[in-house]
Amino acid sequence: MSSRSTADAAPLAFWKRPWLGVLSRSLAAIFGGYALAASTGALMAVALPMARSQAVLTGMLTAIVICACAALWAFAVRSAWKAWWGIVTPAVLMALATWLLRGAA
């Protein structure tokens, strides 16, 4: 007989349901993709060496592509953890770079 009872295994079984992975990836694609696109657009608006209006427009157009790529990434990797890691890490790094560049200007 196993040392674990079925009552102990029930909470663990809940977290292994496939729909939770799909939900997590969907949230990563929606909210993480938005954060990544916003930080990309902001960084490009601050960092590009051109007129501010042109830099903002370029950043916004690039952000649309980045958001679509983030959604593709969320469902292309093997696990939901890698999806979150691959989207949130660059978003945070770009937000930090934007903050540093904005403070330097």
Image: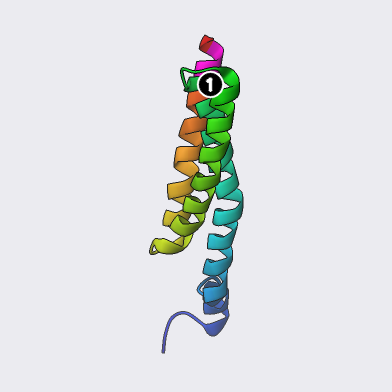
Coordinates of residue 104 in the picture (x, y in percent): 51, 10
Camera sees residue 70: yes
Q: Is residue 85 left or right of residue 19?
A: left
Is the N terminus in the top left, top right, bottom left or bottom right quadrant?
Answer: bottom left
Coordinates of residue 17 in the picture (x, y in percent): 53, 76
Q: Secondary structure at mark 1?
A: helix
Residue in the picture at 59% in, 65% down: 23
**Which residues fall within the magenta stretch?**
99-103
**Residue 15 shown in magenta:** no
Residue in the picture at 52% in, 75% down: 18
Residue in the picture at 53% in, 32% down: 58
Q: Main secondary structure of the magenta part?
A: helix
Label 1, on which residue? Answer: 46
Observer-nearest of 3 and 22 = 22
Residue in the picture at 50% in, 35% down: 92
Coordinates of residue 35 in the picture (x, y in percent): 58, 42
Observer-nearest of 37 and 74 = 37
**At label 1, which amino acid type do we have?**
Val
Q: Work out whether 1 lies above or below 89.
A: below
Looking at the image, the residue that sits furthest to the left is 78
Q: Work out whether 74 lies above or below 4.
A: above
Is the C terminus in the top left, top right, bottom left or bottom right quadrant?
Answer: top right
Q: Work out whether 43 lies above or below 63.
A: above
Q: Residues within 10 Å of mark 1 (few under 14, many from 20)?
A: some
Coordinates of residue 44 in the picture (x, y in percent): 50, 28
Q: Is residue 31 left or right of residue 3?
A: right
Observer-nearest of 90 and 1 = 90
Looking at the image, the residue that sits furthest to the top is 105
